[in-house]
Amino acid sequence: MPAAIGAAVIGELALGAVAELVVGYAVVGVGFIGLNYAAQALFGDEKRADAQVTVRQPVAPRRRVLGQAKVGGVIVVLETTKYNDTNKILYRAAVHCVGPVQILQYFFGDIKTSLGPGAGGIVPDSVYQGKVVIEGHIGTEDQPASASLLQLSYWNGSMQLKGLCYSVVVATPLKKGSQIFPEGAPDVRLLVAGAPSYDPRTGGYGYTDNAAILLLDYLMHESGYGLALSEISVQSFIDLANVCDQPVALIEPDPNGATSELRYRSWGSYDYFEQRADVLGRMLAACDGELYQDADGLVAVRGGRWQEPTFTIDESMILGWDQLEEGDEAYNTFTRVKHTYTSPWHDYQPTEGDPWDDLASQAAQGVIETEKSFVRAPSHSQSRRLAKIAMAKGNPRFRLTGLRLSPAGLPAYGEPTVRLVLPSFGIDTTFAIMRGTLAMAGNALTSVKLDLISFDASAYAWDPAEEGQRPPLPDTYN
């Protein structure tokens, strides 16, 4: 049974269109007639142009955060009630994501408030005049109903929004409210730290942004592949998780003053309705990961670092091959990798980094660009390191497809790298195995078939001076 499950997961990833798309945070929607009328409660006696919109009510997406993400929401309540003859109270509630999460920061649109992490309260910034309150709910299964929404006639204690992280804004009229909230009702966005994940190194659950642990989480979670630990090569994830936790020095401290970061972190969210292969592709890209089926039929992971070969293929094992390509700088597929990552310093939006250039190849054939998306990578340095690896994998000196080996070559199957010795072709170097299959006749193994690219440790060697120029900070950063 594990063999069948492992093959299904690997096959789905191979057949799916691995996401190279920029994915933003949750769509904000509203299904109320007269949205501007409700928002008018914030502006007191100020005059605003009459406007009315009708928007079909969307189904709130089930969005899950792993690592950190800034998330908008879907409005579930937008209501005004009178508290005296002239003034009204505005209530606005929005669902942001699936819980449980930690709320780290509160925003009105792109403006960070001074409200601290946790359950919210009166927004302390003077511009809000002490008249705006945000109530935050982290999405536990036993969370009580909102005390604010219970003031509405149609809300009751059974309406707990179990398992959903949501916010409630309560506001009374503001002086110059139309300038403070030019879009109308306050648009709350949250910076959240995502759901607790299982770490097989400790046997416990907790917040992490370790790319390998979050990949394991997605494979096991009901919104992902729903695999059991017995169907997974746990040790392979432990090995990669330890690599992800290695510190990498920064030549330029980040805006918070940090002089190092962990090697492979993973931040972002995904919608339950997305294709699983797309989500999985983004998570693998954050750590140079590759899923494969090991000899026991389990789902295993490799990548993220150089692994010295433990097996050598020589001519005595080779039955033939489909194609052998040899190139140099004049035949490179691309000479520049443009890459995108998610920058916490740019409103948690996908941001284009300093391209990775192969200057020697550019001198021979000019600039040939390719684009890579590392949107779950939360740093420029990490994205540059991944771009360097992509350059090495995309432009090997040798590419050997359909290499057929006798049963003596079986130990190569499932290995990340091998040494290939072909004296008649002048080849004696290390290769990465990109794909492998076994040929059987009944119960007898007849051959092993591999696709190889020449590859070595230089792809993972890193000098902090290679981190390039980060995009400049926006003027609004604080």
Image (cartoon, rainbow, N blue to C red):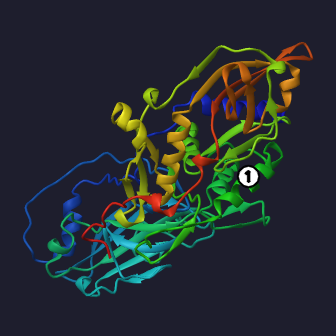
Asked if residue 446 is positioned above or below residue 54 in the image, the reply reads above
Specify whether 173 is left or right of 358.
left
Q: Quadrant of the C terminus?
A: bottom left
- Image x and y of residue 133, in percent: 36, 80
Q: Nearer the viewer, residue 176 or 2?
A: 2
Q: Nearer the viewer, residue 349 or 172?
A: 349
Q: Position of residue 262 (x, y in %)?
A: 59, 65
Q: Amino acid at mark 1?
A: Phe
Residue at (34, 76) in percent of width and height: 170
Q: Position of residue 93 (x, y in %)?
A: 39, 66
The answer to which quarter of the image holds residue 231 is top right
Q: Give the residue furthest to the right.
A: 443
Work out which quarter of the rendered image holds the N terminus and state it: top right
Q: Nearer the viewer, residue 84 or 275?
A: 275
- Tell me if residue 5 comes above or below residue 129 in the rendering: above
Which residue is nearer to you in this view: 225 or 120? 225
Crowdedness near tag 1: few (<14), some (14–19) or many (≥20) residues, C-alpha within 10 Å? many
Query: Which element carries disc 1, helix, strand or loop?
Result: helix
Indicate left or right for 358 with 460 as reference: left
x then y, percent, for residue 295:
84, 34
Residue 338 can be seen, yes or no: yes
Image-quadrant location for residue 14: top right
In the rendered image, is residue 101 in sight? no
Q: Going 7% across and 61% down the picture, which residue do you hit?
A: 49
Location of mark 1 (residue): 237
147 vs 312: above or below: below
Q: How many marks?
A: 1
